[in-house]
Image: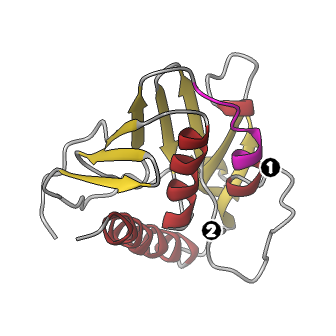
Amino acid sequence: MSLDEILSRARDHYVEQLTAFVRELRANGKRGGAEVKLQLSEDSPLFQRLYCLDYIENDAEGVRPIDMLPDRLLRFDPASFKRRAVTIHVESICWDDVQLSFDGTTPNLDAWFGVWFDPEEKNFDATAELSGRIHSLGTGNGLITVDFGSAPAQALLELIDVLGAAGVREIVLRTSRQPESSS
């Protein structure tokens, strides 16, 4: 299996669950919305203090934020791939919890984030069931953590390219959760 296939499979597996989750919440008759972007407090560790919530209910009972925790996770055999000058070691992938570990400092991610989080919602499509955007980004030296939300696999490939352009030559992809089932 190629890197593109693994990433697409992990993404599709997660988005299938997210779509079912959103549909179920919409069917309950309460007012709400999927993939709602929030500005967080000054002490938030997230990139630009922005977060996209999976779903939010807003009715007579009040506002209730709801994030989905997938109940089915894919298991992959560890594998290594080459993308341009970067070697990528895939240990595990959960699309809403992707950790990229590497040596060095995190490059400027403003442009990548602008496209894949779309803070200004320049590419917002009110008719789409899901946004096709990431939900959060955390950064530190040698570690980037992303909830890729409903973004396509291309978002992760482009992040790898940004790291490669900044001189990173080796990346380990993993998740902080352990896959329990195989699909």
Q: Residues within 10 Å of mark 1 (few under 14, many from 20)?
A: some
Q: Is residue 62 above or below residue 9?
A: above
Residue closest to the eye, 157 or 119? 157
Say if mark 1 contacts mark 2, CB within 8 Å. Answer: no
Query: Which percent across, then down, holds residue 40?
Result: 72, 31
Residue tagged 1: 119
Residue 176 shows in the view: yes
Mark 1 residue element = loop
Q: Is residue 141 above or below residue 69?
A: above
Amino acid carrying mark 1 in the image: Pro
The label shown at residue 132 is: 2
Horizontally, is 173 left or right of 57 in the view?
left
Residue closest to the eye, 108 or 93? 108
Residue drawn where x is 35% and y is 54% of the image: 82
Q: How is the image coloured?
A: secondary structure
Q: Is residue 126 above or below residue 119?
A: below
The magenta span reads: 106-113
Residue at the bottom extreme? 127
Q: CA distance from mark 1 to mark 2?
A: 13 Å
Mark 2 residue element = loop
Residue closest to the eye, 132 or 165? 165
Residue drawn where x is 24% and y is 62% of the image: 72
Amino acid carrying mark 2 in the image: Gly
Determine if the magenta segment contains residue 8.
no
Q: Earlier in the sequence, mark 1 or mark 2?
A: 1
